[in-house]
Image (cartoon, rainbow, N blue to C red):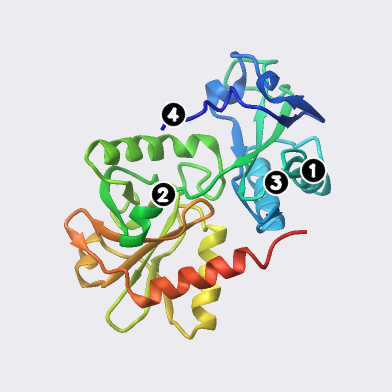
Amino acid sequence: MQILPFDNRDGVIWLNGKFVEWRHANVHVLNHGLHYASCVFEGLRIYNGKIFKLDEHTERLFKSAKILDLDIPYNYQEVVDISKQIILKQNISDGYLRPVVWRGSEMMAISAQKNKIHVAVATWEWGSYFDPKLKLNGIKLNISSWRRPAPNTIPWDTKAAGLYMICTLSKHEAEEKGFTDSLMLDHEGNIAEATGANVFFKNKLGELHTPVPDSFLDGITRREVIKIATIKGIKVVERKIRPEEMKDFEGCFLTGTAAEVTPVSQINDYKFKVCEVISSLNDSYQKLVRKDTAA
């Protein structure tokens, strides 16, 4: 199946205060965001024409921008309103929303304090992040050769573009080896996350164990799934998890805005079952996203 390139589609993109024809929403090749990764973004899901967790994602966008010293030239409510307007203009029912903030072209050096801050919001129809057929039986992951850096070396609690470089490398590495995604360890060799999703394990007692998010993003979906599990009476343990502990877990799944709740059947040589607990969490999450949406 041929994929339509993202720079050659119909519709509009909101760019710096106005709606621009999709193919004309361009930036100059000499911009700081492209060369120096001074860029933050968000990814939001749209279900039945409504944006899921719009407030939480918008808050995180502003937090990420502040940490990267990007002064967004629009206020919180303006970004929320723009997000709602763009999905109406694009007539999106089930899709994805991408706000992005970056430094412009006034200076091309490490220091860029005078550069204009640009903002764009785009949206498009989108279904499942992983192949739905693979999700039924659980996807397969390798363990990446790349690790999440120490938290005192990067702005780890932001959704900054530069942090995804090793995610792309890890994902490519996994796909070349026949896996769907990759599990990343942290700088101490503990389990961290997948390339774009948090990870949970189920033990023989029915408990869920998940890494402490102290060097990677504490995902919005991760927090929602913990709430769902708690309501169901499932104990959730947040702790450091060593890779060799995977032999003692029965189930595994990923969570994320894109991944939603995705069962995992294998990580390297460790095998897992798509058990009832994981299926139940997925069912509850699907009900939540189609009910608890931003108007």
Extreme residue toward the left, this view = 269
What amino acid is labelled 4 in the image?
A: Gln
Going from N to C along the chain, the mark reached first, 3 or 2, is 3
Which residue does the numbered mark 3 point to in the structure image?
A: 62
In the rendered structure, the answer to whether residue 45 lies left or right of residue 86 reads: left
Indicate which disc residue 130 carries. Answer: 2
- Can you give x and y, in whole percent of width and height, for residue 44 in the image? 62, 49
Alpha carbons under labels 1 and 4: distance apart: 29 Å
Mark 3 or 4, nearer chain start: 4
Disc 3 from disc 2: Cα separation: 28 Å
Residue 14 falls in image quadrant:
top right
| Residue in the image at 60% along x and 42% along y | 125
Q: Secondary structure at mark 2?
A: loop
Q: CA distance from mark 1 to mark 2?
A: 28 Å
Label annotation for residue 85: 1
* Residue 209, position as x, y percentages in the image: 37, 71
Which mark is in front, 1 or 4?
A: 4
Which mark sits nearer the N-terminus, 1 or 4? 4
Q: Are marks 1 and 2 in contact (CB under 8 Å)?
A: no
**Rounded to the nearest whole Å, what is the CA distance between mark 1 and mark 3?**
19 Å
Q: Amino acid at mark 1?
A: Gln
Which of 294 and 106 lies nearest the eye of the viewer? 294
Of labels 3 and 2, the one closer to you: 2
- Cα gap from disc 2 to disc 4, whole angstroms: 17 Å
Instruction: Name the residue carrying label 4.
Output: 2
CA separation in Å, label 3 and label 4: 36 Å
Tell me where residue 288 sits by quadrant.
bottom right
- Which comes before the other along the chain, label 2 or label 4? 4
Please give the name of the residue rendered at 67% of the width and 56% of the height, measured from the top-left corner.
48
